[in-house]
Amino acid sequence: QVQLVESGGGLVQAGGSLTLSCAASGRTFSSYAMGWFRQAPGKEREFVAHISWSGGTPYYADSVKGRFTISRDNAKNTVYLQMNSLKPEDTAVYYCAAWRTAFMFGRPTNSDYWGQGTRVTVSS
């Protein structure tokens, strides 16, 4: 079992930056692929990014490519999402995700484990 706890959300002006963190419990964290999803008000949850167990092969949704960076520190059981050049359309609740596999491919629509979410609001 893996428990995920996000932090780092908040209010930021357009063009600003935020870094989200996701702390994971469980001895198997380092063997799982990790990622982020988001859900904007009135919309379905959507994939944002994922990263393999080793920190390689990051993959991003087109809407965040070039602005967001996913990374992980297996020694700290933590995955990060560095968000730059934020836009009002990035406003959403951001969820940390974990899969019981070392690698993910493409744009997943679900996850084996979820965090409780952290809210990001980007003002124009």
Image: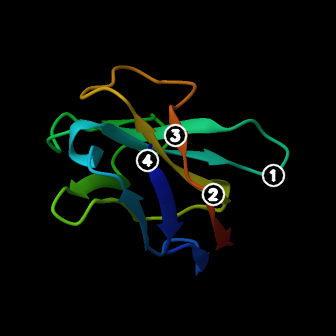
Query: Which of 14/9 is in front?
Result: 9
Residue appearing at x 27%, y 60% in the figure: 77
The disc at residue 41 is 1
Q: Determine the image quadrant of residue 57.
A: top left
Tell me how far mark 1 sits from mark 4, CA to CA. 27 Å
56 and 15: which one is in front?
A: 56
Q: Look at 38% across and 54% down and name the residue there.
A: 67
Between the residue at mark 3 and the residue at mark 4, the CA separation in whole angstroms equals 7 Å
SS for tag 4? Answer: loop
Chain-order first, disc 1 or disc 2: 1
Q: Position of residue 51 (x, y in %)?
A: 28, 39
Check the image and report above or below for 28 versus 14.
above
Q: CA distance from mark 2 to mark 3?
A: 10 Å
In the rendered image, the quadrant that contains the C terminus is: bottom right
Please say if 17 is above or below 104: below
Do tag 3 and tag 4 residues touch (Cβ < 8 Å)? yes
Q: Sequence-wise, which precedes: disc 4 or disc 2?
A: 4
Decide if residue 52 is on the left or right side of residue 113. left
Looking at this view, is 11 or 20 the one in front?
A: 20
Q: Which residue is mark 4?
A: 2
